[in-house]
Image (cartoon, grey):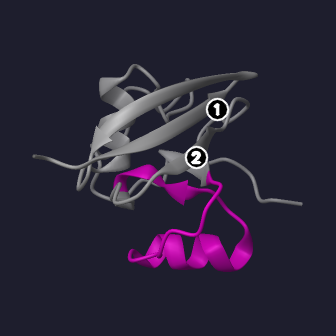
Amino acid sequence: MDESCRVVVASEGTETELSVPAGTVLRDALLAADCSPYGRLSERANCGGRGLCATCGVRLAADVAADHWHDRLADRFGYPRLSCQVTVDRDMRVELLDDKLVWGGRDS
């Protein structure tokens, strides 16, 4: 039996609960559930999940190890994490950035 993880997606004051197969890339799970991690300007102009454009940023409520160089810097300086570089391997809570134009801002 395949293991699945519970992913709660918060966006614009609502929450959506997803059941995601363990090992799925978070970006792919969000797009499949019509919960786009992209801003309105980057919805069509992005790198397709290769970790190059930094436009699929989300906030993660729990600590998920940063494996990608951009995510290590994001952790250090308070920027959003790249959903294309996060593998769903546990239950998690994800916040989509509602006011994001391209990259998303730093935490204050």
In the image, what residue type sits under mark 2?
Answer: Arg
Residue at 29% in and 50% down: 25
Counting residues from the N terminus, which is met first, the one under dot 1 or under dot 2? Answer: 1
Say whether residue 83 is magenta. Answer: yes
Front residue of 98/19: it is 19
Q: Which residues are magenta?
A: 60-84
Q: Quadrant of residue 14?
A: top right
Q: Quadrant of residue 94?
A: top right
Q: Residue furthest front?
A: 1
Above or below 22: residue 7: above
Residue at 35% in and 29% down: 31
Q: x and y percent of residue 98 in the render?
A: 69, 29
Above or below 108: residue 59: above
For this view, does 8 lie left or right of residue 95? left
Q: x and y percent of residue 65 in the render?
A: 47, 76
Q: x and y percent of residue 75 in the render?
A: 63, 74
- Mark 1 = which residue? 10
- Mark 2 = which residue? 93
Above or below 13: residue 57: below
Q: Is residue 45 visible?
A: no
- Quadrant location of the C terminus in the rendered image: bottom right
Q: Residue furthest right?
A: 108
Q: CA distance from mark 1 to mark 2?
A: 8 Å
Q: CB atoms at circles 1 and 2 under 8 Å apart?
A: yes
For this view, does 2 lie left or right of residue 74? left
